[in-house]
Structures are given as C-alpha cells and as structure tokens.
Image (cartoon, grey):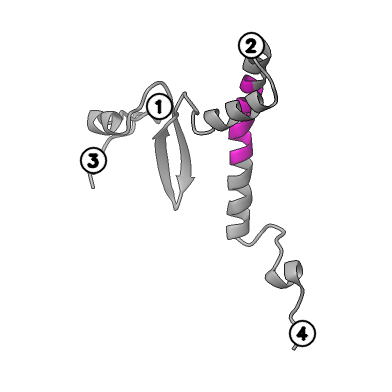
Amino acid sequence: MLKKRISVSQKRQITIPIEFYNDIGIEKEVECYIQNNAIVIRPVRESGGEFDEQILADLISQGLSGEELLNRFKEARKKIRPAVEGLIAEAELAAKDKSKHSTYDDVFGAEDK
C-alpha cells in the first residue's frame, strides 16, 4: 500500500501527491466523506455512465427519439445520484440498527411448530 505523510496548511488545505492523483485518475473534482474515522477522497466521474445504456434502452423502448429522448435522458440521469445516496443513507441507518426494518417473521410470518 502506497502511503505518504502530507502537511495541512493553515487554511486546512492539502496537496494530493502526484502519484495518488495520477493513480486514481482525478480529473476536475473529488468528493470526500468520513468512513471508519478516516477521510476518504475519491474522484468524481463526470460520465456517470454506469446506467446510461439502461436509461437509453428504456427511453427508446418507450418510442422516444430526437430532442424528447435527449431531454428525458438528462432528467433521468439527474435522479440517479440522489437515489443512490438515499439508498446508502438507508443502508447506513440499517447497519446501525436505527432504521425501520422487517424481520424474516414479519415478512413471511412466524413458523408454526
């Protein structure tokens, strides 16, 4: 594991070592979050292409094309990140046992013996 000690400026700024920068492919932005008492910094991918093909296939199957296809694609794409962030937040609450969740018996009923 590549490890480096870096200083923090008086303005709380850091300089990402070039090896790290190049290795993970940072472009214009990074996002950071706290996980396991550590700050994680990772690149923001502009493409968001993970779901592009599925979105386009669905919209095309609805008979959309041209400008309408483009507009609906942009709308659908904007909804992905908030939806994923919501799922992550729910999963984190469930992991901490702070969310409403169903047990096996709640879903399938208690087994009669």
Q: Position of residue 39 (x, y in %)?
A: 42, 42
Q: Residues within 10 Å of mark 4 (few under 14, many from 20)?
A: few
Disc 1 or disc 4, which is closer to the eye?
4
Q: What residue span does the magenta drawing correspond to? A: 73-84
Q: Position of residue 1 (x, y in %)?
A: 23, 48
Q: Position of residue 30 (x, y in %)?
A: 43, 29
Q: CA distance from mark 1 to mark 3?
A: 20 Å
Pointer 3: what residue? 4
Pointer 1: what residue? 11
Q: Amino acid at mark 4?
A: Asp
Disc 1 or disc 3, which is closer to the eye?
3
Question: Mark 2: which secondary structure?
Answer: helix
Residue at 62% x, 20% y is 74
Q: Nearer the viewer, residue 58 or 28?
A: 58
Disc 2 or disc 4, which is closer to the eye?
2
Pointer 4: what residue? 112
Q: CA distance from mark 1 to mark 4?
A: 64 Å
Q: Amino acid at mark 2?
A: Gly
Question: Mark 3: which secondary structure?
Answer: loop
